[in-house]
């Protein structure tokens, strides 16, 4: 692997891991505050899985450049993070959280399906591993979209509001990072455009079947992962405070 | 000079390590230990994670290392491998029966699940207490990443099941 490809791969793995870490941190904000106990537990399980996935992606990066996953997670500032903006938006209400998790899980499942065939074996193996866990997430959030969309006028209104806000942000999941075309050409990373097509088809069908209208004006669509909303600063401040206060933090 | 144990003896020793979250089965029966290699004074243990975010993994890794070291190896390497990905099909039939006796409905065979993106109709789960199939899923997610929560409509008892992965 030449240096250019390696650098692009390191950057892409970082973006994958950062998405999972920030989404997991947002989801964890519901721990102890879920609408019912079962859902509190379910979401905690889901985000614990996402953290596991982040560990695998950071681990693949570590194998390439020797970086320490804990340093990456807890000692980078917001401007060094490469997550998409969708995952950093405040958790909102339950409809907002479930919709985001659905849009993300559907993307992740489809992406993993494609990444299983990567020519880079460590990536193919990790994708095969993670895909098995993702199945349970999608099943869960898929049902929640339907439940809220076809539930009451109020639950439909809230879910629609969440969709109007998130639809544009979600499109960033399919924006390649700089250098990603090199990885696609080598068969290391899957091409995002066919994944986006399937995602659009499946998401549209399920959202419409759940009584929602796709926004006519998709609204703000972020492109570069180098830019973030103000919300990333505060979520990192909370997430990183213990590690930065006491990097060893072995007793608590 | 002491003689070091052979691979079979190492496997036997590792089979005495209980799973930290489900102590009625050991880490070998669980399918977590994939390979044992001995190269002179060095033992190389390959393990595979069950669920990638499972918090018990650190503990299992430590226990594998400690147990192997206690057998007299000067150097112990615990390697993590991801391929082929762990499957509940690897849990031995005896261990599945012990799960059932412990009150956890064992996982079902995975055949036919591959390539399915969204599966809404859950396969029937048998109550580990009374054996009834008249059960409902209360939560696909349970107290640990590998389990779901059900209730038996006949004996009215809640119970956990091991997810089929």
Image (cartoon, coloured by chain):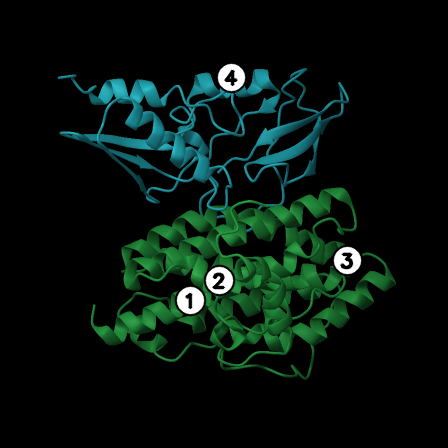
Chain colours: A green, B cyan
Tell me the distance, in whole angstroms, between the alpha carbons under discs 1 and 2.
Answer: 10 Å
Nearer the camera: disc 4 or disc 2: 2
Q: Which residue is mark 2?
A: A73
Mark 2: few/some/many CA within 10 Å (<14, 14-19, 20+): many
The lab-note entry on whether marks 4 and 2 share a chain reads: no
Residue extending farthest right: A153
| x, y percent for residue A178 | 38, 80
**SS for callout 1:** helix
For residue B46, what is the image quadrant? top left
| x, y percent for residue A145 | 70, 58
Nearer-N-terminus badge (2/3): 2
The residue nearer to you, when weighing B156 against B6, is: B6
Label 2: chain letter: A
Tell me the distance, in whole angstroms, between the alpha carbons under discs 1 and 3.
Answer: 33 Å
Tell me the distance, in whole angstroms, between the alpha carbons under discs 4 and 1.
Answer: 42 Å
Mark 1: few/some/many CA within 10 Å (<14, 14-19, 20+): many
**SS for callout 2:** helix
Tell me the distance, in whole angstroms, between the alpha carbons under discs 3 and 4.
Answer: 39 Å
Q: Which residue is mark 4?
A: B97
Nearer the camera: disc 1 or disc 3: 1
For residue A14, what is the image quadrant? bottom left
Tell me the distance, in whole angstroms, between the alpha carbons under discs 2 and 3.
Answer: 34 Å
B36 with respect to A199 (left or right) = left
Q: Which residue is mark 3?
A: A148
B40 with respect to A27 (left or right) = left
Residue located 44% across and 40% down the image: B58
The lab-note entry on whether marks 4 and 1 share a chain reads: no
Label 3: chain letter: A
| x, y percent for residue A122 | 31, 54
Q: Which residue is mark 1?
A: A14
């Amino acid at each position: 692997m030449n240096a250019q490809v390696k650098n692009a791969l390191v950057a892409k793995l970082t973006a994958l891991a950062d998405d999972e870490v920030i989404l997991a941190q947002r989801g964890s904000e519901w721990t102890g505050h879920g609408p019912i106990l079962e859902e509190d537990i379910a979401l905690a399980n889901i985000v614990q899985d996402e953290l596991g996935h982040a560990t695998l992606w950071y681990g693949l990066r570590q194998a390439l450049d020797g970086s320490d996953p804990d340093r990456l997670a807890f000692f980078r500032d917001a401007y060094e993070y490469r997550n998409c903006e969708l995952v950093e938006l405040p958790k909102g209400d339950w409809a907002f959280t479930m919709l985001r998790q659905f849009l993300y899980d559907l993307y992740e499942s489809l992406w993993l399906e494609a990444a299983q065939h990567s020519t880079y074996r460590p990536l193919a193996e990790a994708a095969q591993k993670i895909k098995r866990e993702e199945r349970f997430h999608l099943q869960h959030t898929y049902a929640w979209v339907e439940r809220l969309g076809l539930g009451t006028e109020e639950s439909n209104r809230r879910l629609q509001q969440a969709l109007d806000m998130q639809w544009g942000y979600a499109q960033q999941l399919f924006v390649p990072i700089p250098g990603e075309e090199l990885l696609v050409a080598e068969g290391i990373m899957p091409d995002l455009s066919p994944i986006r097509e399937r995602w659009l088809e499946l998401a549209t069908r399920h959202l419409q079947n759940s009584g929602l209208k796709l926004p006519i004006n998709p609204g703000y669509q972020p492109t570069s992962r180098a830019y973030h909303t103000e919300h990333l600063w505060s979520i990192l401040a909370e997430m990183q405070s213990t590690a930065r206060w006491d990097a060893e933090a072995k007793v608590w | 000079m002491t003689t070091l144990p052979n691979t079979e003896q190492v496997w036997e020793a590792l089979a005495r390590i209980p799973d930290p979250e489900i102590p009625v089965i050991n880490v070998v029966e669980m399918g977590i230990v994939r390979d044992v290699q001995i190269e002179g004074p060095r033992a190389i243990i390959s393990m595979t994670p069950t669920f990638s975010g499972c918090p018990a993994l650190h503990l299992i890794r430590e226990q594998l290392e400690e147990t192997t070291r206690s057998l007299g190896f000067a150097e112990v390497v615990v390697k993590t491998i991801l391929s082929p990905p762990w499957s509940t099909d690897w849990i031995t039939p005896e261990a599945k029966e012990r799960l059932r006796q412990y009150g956890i409905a064992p996982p079902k065979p995975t055949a036919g699940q591959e390539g399915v993106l969204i599966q809404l109709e859950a396969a029937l789960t048998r109550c580990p207490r009374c054996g009834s199939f008249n059960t409902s899923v209360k939560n696909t997610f349970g107290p640990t990443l590998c389990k779901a929560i059900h209730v038996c409509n006949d004996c009215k008892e809640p119970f956990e099941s091991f997810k089929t992965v």
